[in-house]
Image (spheres, rainbow, N blue to C red):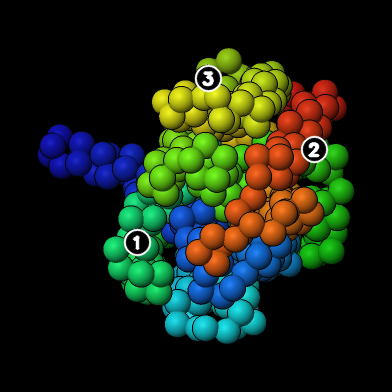
């Protein structure tokens, strides 16, 4: 009898982790889609005859969809079945990837990229919505950081492994395999994800009733006009710029064209950027939960990231390969302070508005991709001297310096936002 009771108790302890991290596989998958252009940028530029601005625009369609649908996603996840919404969003994303894999039209590629982005609007919010139901508030920084770690693993897969696959199998076969991976994750989520613990079903009904009385417009107003939410969103967007620019699309070409690294060598540095976040996220989350502070660690992350970004920008041709890898790893580690924005927002808003409030932070984070990726491409093309090798534009060190100046500027503004944030006590 004791053994049976222990087994039941162990299952209850494991169930929250199984549910939340099965759902987080969707976030893992979407981060592959979000960051894959870094591995296949040269293939896309060749296949569609794109310049840097057009490549940035194609990538950005994913994030335009995110921006449009994030407020809707937050409202839906607070009101309806999280499991059903995840499955529907993931299916739409898979269809977009499959379409992107077979089209030769730039216009259709943009449309399919947009479709994938719609599905992506739901991936992180759904994981946090589930975590808020399955874990105590005092665990949320650690759990959130582990969910973000899942995403960063997807970002790593989108670097060297995807580069090798694209070189071996070709661009379109690689994308079709990517769609098949989505189907496998769909099956896992279908079998393992539950909306909430059985003991919280009445609480969930009460929250839905409270939201019905509150109304959609008022819930959006409470979330999107909350100064703390807006500051956390801006901080997250700006500290995520290395992922958005170096990890998602330009890191590999930057090192190939300025430091003469091979394609595989150059893909390792963005991989280390994600690895730094994979390790840094749980460390930052654990430390934050232990010291019961968020904002101080966010200040530290912004300051060190500012120093590291200036080093990477100013000295790329003077640094050895090992030093470059270390700098990218360290940048990923310290920018992982962005994960603290999510529990900080969750603590400062009513529980029934968790997904809607978190969507504010995600809106800013995805907005960073949508704004800064095309801006980066524009700054690259602005001083381009017309050099082309194998139908791919070659940019100078000064072109990259001009575009990458976005990073230290962003970290400086992120630091300013922390001065206006309020440190909140944790509930539960």
- Measure how far apart labels 1 and 2 are at the Cα level: 42 Å
State the image coordinates of residue 212 (x, y, percent, origin top left): 74, 65
**Badge 2 is on which residue?**
231
Is residue 239 shown to the viewer in this render?
yes
Find out whether the residues at labels 3 and 1 contact each other: C-beta distance under 8 Å.
Answer: no
**Neighbour tally class for label 2: few under 14, some 14-19, many 20 plus, Cα within 10 Å:** many
Check disc 2 and report its element: helix, strand or loop: helix
- Closer-to-camera residue (67/409): 409
Which mark is first along the chain, 2 or 1?
A: 1
Say which residue label 1 marks. Answer: 167
The numbered mark at residue 287 is: 3
Query: Between residues 174 and 232, which one lies in front from this camera angle?
Result: 174
The residue depicted at 59 percent of the width and 73 percent of the height is 49
Question: Mark 3 or mark 2, which is nearer the start of the sequence?
Answer: 2
Residue at position x 54%, y 49% in the image: 253
Measured as percent of width and height from the top left, residue 79 is found at 64, 64
**SS category of the residue bearing label 1:** helix
């Amino acid at each position: 009898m004791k053994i049976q009771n222990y087994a039941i108790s162990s299952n209850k302890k494991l169930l929250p982790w199984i549910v939340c991290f099965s759902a987080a596989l969707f976030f893992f998958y979407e981060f592959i889609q979000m960051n894959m252009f870094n591995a296949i940028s040269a293939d896309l530029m060749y296949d569609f005859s794109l310049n840097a601005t057009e490549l940035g625009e194609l990538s950005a369609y994913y994030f335009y969809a995110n921006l449009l649908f994030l407020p809707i996603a937050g409202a839906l996840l607070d009101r309806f079945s999280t499991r059903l919404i995840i499955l529907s969003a993931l299916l739409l994303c898979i269809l977009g990837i499959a379409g992107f894999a077979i089209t030769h039209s730039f216009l259709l590629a943009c449309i399919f990229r947009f479709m994938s982005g719609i599905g992506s609007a739901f991936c992180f919010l759904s994981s946090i919505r589930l975590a808020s139901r399955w874990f105590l508030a005092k665990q949320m920084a650690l759990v959130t950081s582990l969910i973000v770690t899942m995403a960063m693993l997807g970002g790593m897969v989108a670097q060297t492994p995807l580069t090798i696959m694209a070189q071996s199998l070709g661009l379109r076969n690689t994308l079709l395999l990517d769609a098949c991976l989505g189907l496998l994750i769909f099956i896992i989520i279908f079998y393992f994800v539950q909306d909430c613990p059985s003991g919280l079903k009445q609480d969930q009904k009460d929250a839905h009733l409270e939201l019905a009385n509150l109304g959609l417009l008022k819930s959006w107003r409470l979330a999107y006009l909350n100064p703390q939410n807006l500051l956390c969103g801006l901080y997250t967007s700006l500290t995520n710029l290395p992922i958005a620019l170096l990890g998602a699309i330009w890191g590999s070409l930057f090192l190939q064209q300025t430091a003469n690294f091979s394609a595989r060598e150059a893909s390792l540095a963005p991989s280390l950027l994600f690895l730094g976040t994979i390790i840094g996220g749980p460390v930052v989350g654990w430390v934050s939960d232990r010291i019961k502070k968020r904002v101080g660690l966010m200040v530290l992350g912004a300051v060190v990231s500012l120093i590291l970004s200036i080093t990477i920008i100013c000295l790329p041709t003077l640094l050895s390969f090992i030093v470059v890898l270390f700098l990218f790893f360290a940048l990923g580690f310290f920018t992982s302070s962005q994960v603290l924005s999510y529990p900080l927002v969750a603590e400062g808003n009513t529980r029934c508005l968790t997904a809607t409030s978190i969507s504010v932070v995600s809106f800013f984070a995805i907005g960073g991709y949508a704004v800064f990726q095309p801006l980066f491409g524009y700054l690259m093309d602005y001083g381009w001297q017309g050099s082309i090798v194998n139908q791919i534009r070659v940019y100078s060190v000064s072109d990259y310096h001009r575009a990458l100046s976005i990073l230290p500027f962003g970290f400086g503004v992120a630091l300013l936002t922390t001065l206006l944030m309020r440190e909140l006590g944790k509930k539960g």
